[in-house]
């Protein structure tokens, strides 16, 4: 690859190309020029032994006297924007033009820098020195250059936390002690132009957050007892910055703070989520901001690959050190939530109160201790289910090559369960289903949709989403052939199902038994095998170009019935939430079961109904509640993510929890009196809701 770092280098490289092509270099700036398939000798700047021809379109303009080029105005985009990247392949030179933005925070590893390279912290080493029950740790907040993928990719200039005498890291250095330990922490602010406030350096649990305010160039020392065991975090705020979409998220300044019981095993891993974004003053092409979304200091596909054995007990402490929300989804397996906490407290659940989930919604600056057992081999993922946090669009410019780069980035980590036995069971006669992915026009917007009819032809305005309800039977071996009738590749992920990895539906990643889930190309098909290990509520959806394909309609509800049960549409009601466009402007851009107005339900007193809520929108959370005569009527929560709740976790609620992307929840409702009821679905804003009328008659 050949990169132009700035206008000067671009001009010099252009001159070399022009000289090699025997063209006068005086025309190297100030106008547009073209080379098309010109045979030229190899310019020394290219250093490409395979170069035989050049097919380039250079847009080039003068940006004033190059000798006057500066890097002032550190929060503005440098005005010179150059199209100057090419990608070489064997014996050819293919032109691939992308925007290279010389934003002051953008850095490249082969450019000179006065700052240290920020390292990725895998949280395997505890900071400080422990002696006689006292941990002494010396931390420093400083500037550095951070390469969240590899040094072959662009990076960002940002602040980070490190141990004094060492390079800074993201996440910040791990603080891990046993309960009963005393901690002496000295924090130095090496920044010359910003104060810092340090949070989390205090005894746990606590009701009020203490902070340590430090002026530029100064240090402060705090000493405190660690406190109760749990999973916590600490973080640093720069000046009076408040993270937001408008101002950017500066959440790279956070680290894990773990307190272990005395003598407890440390057979776990710590995964810290950090986020940094800096918005552009205005949108440049498709780029709105520069971003870094990392797990332990790396962005997919460069995050750590975990390789447990079948039957291992895997314990992960997941720490959201950002203020953004992250619904953390595990493919192929359920996990138990052992505790949930934040900066100051950690609630450790008794065994009977541990939730079994495939997705757990983590709000800003919260923690989770999770445990799971891989019960079959193959490659899997743990990732945030907010599409905007795992979409390829968050990669830095020039970060679009590499394995799996076509549709994923950010908060994703891979799992490769080693070869071993499988827990999957099947009974009965195999079932074959054919599912079609269709494309059609709906008004001004291109829409997609699933159907079970090969002759499906939707008309403009006709609901194409969600896809058809799939009602399946527990343990019955089920094969679904997906036929792609669209003009773009796609795939299907069977969200929440415990299945073979090769059928899990993450293109070019999910694999086992020598087979792999592909990107299903236009006109092609793929046969998935579903193992249906438990009855429950699940989702099927595209796992390729998520933001666009999900909002175009490529998702649907899925219900697995127990062996001895039959689906009754009169009493069993799926409700699936989606978006109709990638960036909704109003409530009308969201949909419930593909509709704005919900159909009337008629029933009788004493009849029990099951309400199945599914959220597969790219972002956002949903709630439900039932009312009669404006008085809230209780619902009973009975399942989460397809897993029935034990009796100790079933409870009557007047208003449900807020369920995030990738979560499902089942409720039971038995009307005890006749009358008119209303079932409400709403998100964070009380004025935005859907309502369904229920008419309940006497016995």
Image (tube, rainbow, N blue to C red):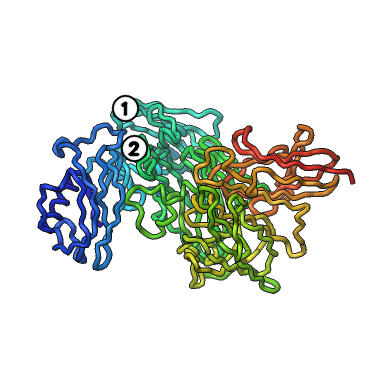
Task: Classify residue 625 as left or right of residue 585.
Answer: right
Rounded to the nearest angstrom, the CA distance separating label 2 from label 1 is 13 Å
Indicate which disc residue 159 carries: 2
- Seen at 73% across and 62% down, the residue is 562
CB atoms of marks 2 and 1 within 8 Å? no
Q: Which of the pair 248/483 is nearer the observer?
A: 483
Is label 2 or label 1 in front?
2
Tag of residue 579: none
Q: x, y percentage for residue 671?
A: 82, 43
Front residue (pair 267, 443): 443
**Residue count near mark 1 (Cα–Cα under 10 Å), binned few <14, some 14–19, many ≥20:** some
Q: Position of residue 283 (x, y in %)?
A: 37, 39
Q: Residue at x 36, y 44 (%)?
A: 285
The answer to which quarter of the image holds residue 619 is top right
Q: Can residue 354 be seen by looking at this rendering?
A: no
The tag on residue 216 is 1
User: Which quadrant, please, contains the N terminus?
Assistant: bottom left
- What residue lies at 27% left-to-right and 31% top-to-bottom? 73
168, above or below 457, in the image: above
Give the secondary structure at mark 1: loop
Residue 92: image location, x then y, percent: 25, 65
> Which residue is situated farthest in the right direction here?
699
Please state the horizontal and vertical placement of residue 151, each as a whole percent of the image: 30, 52
Q: Residue at coordinates 37% horizontally, 42% vertically from top-left?
A: 290
Q: Earlier in the sequence, mark 2 or mark 1?
A: 2
Q: Secondary structure at mark 2?
A: strand
Residue 130 lies left or right of residue 155; in this view the side is: right
């Amino acid at each position: 690859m050949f990169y132009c770092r700035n206008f000067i280098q671009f001009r010099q490289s252009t001159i070399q190309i022009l000289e090699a092509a025997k063209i006068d270099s005086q025309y190297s700036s100030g106008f547009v020029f073209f080379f098309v398939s010109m045979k030229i000798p190899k310019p020394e700047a290219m250093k490409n032994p395979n170069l035989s021809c050049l097919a380039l379109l250079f847009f080039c303009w003068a940006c004033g006297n190059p000798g006057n080029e500066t890097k002032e105005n550190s929060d503005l985009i440098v005005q010179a924007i150059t199209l100057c990247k090419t990608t070489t392949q064997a014996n050819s030179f293919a032109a691939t033009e992308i925007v290279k933005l010389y934003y002051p925070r953008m850095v490249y590893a082969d450019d000179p820098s006065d700052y240290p390279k920020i390292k990725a912290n895998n949280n395997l080493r505890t900071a400080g020195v422990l002696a006689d029950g006292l941990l002494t740790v010396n931390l420093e907040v400083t500037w550095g250059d951070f390469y969240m993928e590899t040094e072959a990719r662009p990076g960002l200039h940002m602040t980070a936390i490190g141990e004094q005498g060492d390079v800074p890291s993201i996440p910040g250095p791990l603080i891990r002690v046993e309960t009963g330990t005393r901690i002496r922490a000295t924090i130095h602010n090496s920044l010359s132009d910003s104060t810092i406030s340090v949070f989390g350096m205090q005894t746990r649990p606590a009701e009020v957050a203490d902070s340590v305010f430090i002026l530029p160039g100064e240090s402060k020392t705090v000493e405190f007892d660690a406190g109760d065991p749990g999973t916590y975090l600490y973080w640093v705020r720069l000046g009076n910055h408040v993270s937001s979409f408008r101002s950017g998220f500066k959440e790279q300044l956070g680290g894990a703070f773990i307190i272990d019981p005395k003598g407890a095993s440390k057979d776990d891993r710590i995964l810290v989520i950090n986020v940094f974004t800096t918005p552009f003053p205005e949108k440049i092409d498709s780029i709105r901001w520069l971003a870094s979304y990392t797990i332990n200091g790396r962005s997919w596909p460069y995050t750590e690959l975990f390789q447990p054995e079948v039957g291992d007990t895997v314990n992960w402490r997941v720490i959201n050190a950002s203020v953004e929300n992250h619904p953390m989804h595990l493919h192929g397996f359920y996990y138990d939530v052992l505790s949930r906490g934040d900066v100051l407290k950690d609630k450790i659940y008794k065994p009977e109160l541990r939730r079994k989930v495939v997705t757990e919604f983590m709000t800003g600056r919260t923690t989770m201790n999770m445990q799971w057992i891989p019960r079959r081999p193959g490659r899997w993922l743990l990732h945030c289910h907010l599409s905007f946090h795992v979409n390829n669009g968050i990669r830095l410019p020039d970060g679009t090559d590499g394995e799996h780069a076509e549709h994923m980035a950010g908060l994703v980590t891979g799992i490769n369960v080693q070869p071993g036995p499988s827990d999957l069971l099947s009974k009965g006669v195999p079932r074959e289903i054919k599912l079609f992915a269709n494309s059609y026009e709906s008004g001004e917007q291109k829409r997609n949709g699933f159907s079970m009819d090969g002759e499906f032809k939707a008309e403009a305005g006709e609901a194409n989403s969600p896809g058809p309800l799939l009602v399946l039977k527990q343990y019955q071996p089920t094969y679904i052939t997906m036929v792609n009738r669209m003009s773009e590749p796609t795939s299907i992920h069977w969200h929440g199902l415990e299945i073979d990895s090769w059928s899990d539906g993450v293109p070019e990643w999910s694999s086992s038994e020598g087979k792999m889930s592909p990107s299903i190309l236009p006109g092609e098909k793929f046969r998935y095998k579903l193992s249906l290990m438990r009855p429950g509520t699940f989702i099927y959806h595209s796992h390729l170009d998520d933001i666009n394909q999900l909002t175009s309609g490529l998702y649907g509800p899925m219900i697995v019935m127990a062996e001895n049960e039959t689906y009754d549409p009169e009493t069993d009601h799926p409700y699936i939430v989606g978006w109709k466009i990638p960036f909704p402007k109003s409530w009308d851009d969201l949909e419930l079961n593909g509709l704005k107005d919900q159909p009337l339900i008629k029933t009788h007193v004493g009849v029990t109904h099951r309400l199945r809520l599914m959220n597969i929108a790219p972002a956002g959370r949903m709630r439900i509640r039932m009312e009669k005569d404006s008085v809230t009527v209780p619902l009973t929560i009975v399942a989460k993510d397809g897993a029935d709740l034990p009796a100790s976790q079933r409870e009557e609620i007047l208003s449900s929890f807020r369920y995030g992307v990738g979560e499902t929840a089942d409720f039971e409702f038995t009307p005890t009196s006749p009358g008119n009821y209303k079932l409400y679905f709403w998100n964070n804003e009380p004025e935005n809701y859907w309502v369904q009328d229920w008419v309940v008659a006497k016995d």
